[in-house]
Amino acid sequence: MTAETAQRGRLGIFGGTFDPIHIGHLRAVTEVAEELELAQVLFMPCHHPPHPKDVQASAAHRLEMVRRAVADNPRFGVSDLEVRRPGKSYAVDSLAEFSRLYPGRPLYWLIGADAFFALHQWYQPRRLFDLADFVVMTRPGSPGRDLREYLTHYLDPAFAPADNAWVRLPNGHGAKLLTTTLLDISSTDIRRRAAQGRALTYLVPPEVEDYICEMKLYTTPEGED
């Protein structure tokens, strides 16, 4: 892939707390990028999650861990858009900014199934589909939900089946389910292991494990001062 192709082709955006980023994140995004032929995927740590969520590491630490995790993959990049922006990190604001920064590039928002099926609780959820397509990452054996039924019930009755298992609006934007390899790794478990002084090998990239140790992140068990 040439640098020009990476700058002009399909752009994936994967947002999250990344507290910390782990191998499960990287593997799932790799498979989505291959399946949809994404030219580039930007990992975007959020600053202030709009929904209640325990976040232990600072935005600066989480951003640095993401940078280290993706540094050796030419297809992956990092966006500090939400870290720099004050206030809550709303996806619709980020997508509007990406549309401005990358005019004409097709945008794909990558999201886990659990988060996607709560999309109706997000800020201006219908407007999201004026800006991007949504790729919903599921795992083998996950409880199935009907994508069209959810979208038509909660967001817009105009969603309809389209080619290649997409469900789309008349404007062309929509959503698609993609099954990714099951890696039962969680950031919560990684934080617990780090607090106990246990190895994080094969759960996070070596560069991330080194950073966690160097910065003494997650040394206090969750729920303690």
Image: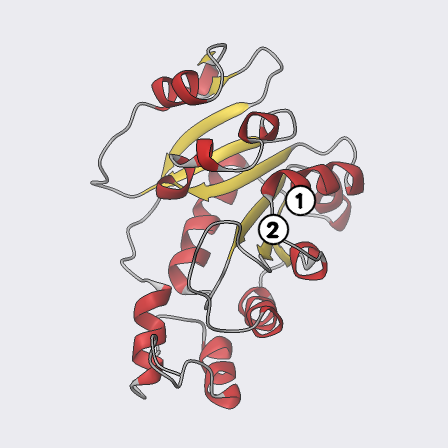
Q: Which residue is mark 1?
A: 94
N-term-proximal mark, 2 vs 1: 2
| x, y percent for residue 81 | 70, 55
Q: Quick check: 21 above or below 35?
A: below
* Label 1: which secondary element: helix
Q: At 59% across and 45% down in the image, what residue appears?
A: 13
Q: At 42% across and 22% down in the image, what residue appears?
A: 154
Spatial CA distance of label 2 from label 1 is: 8 Å
Q: Badge 1, how many Cα within 10 Å: few under 14, some, many 20+?
A: some
Q: Which residue is mark 2?
A: 89
Q: Quadrant of residue 160?
A: top left
Badges 2 and 1: C-beta atoms under 8 Å apart? yes
Between 42 and 80, the one lying in front of the other is 80
Q: Is residue 87 left or right of residue 15?
A: right
The amino acid on which the numbered mark 2 sits, given as a three-letter code, is Ser
Figure quadrant of the C terminus: bottom left
In the image as oriented, which residue stretches furthest toward the front?
Answer: 225
Note whether residue 202 is visible. Answer: no
The amino acid on which the numbered mark 1 sits, given as a three-letter code, is Ser
Between 169 and 11, the one lying in front of the other is 169
Q: Quick check: 79 above or below 217?
A: above
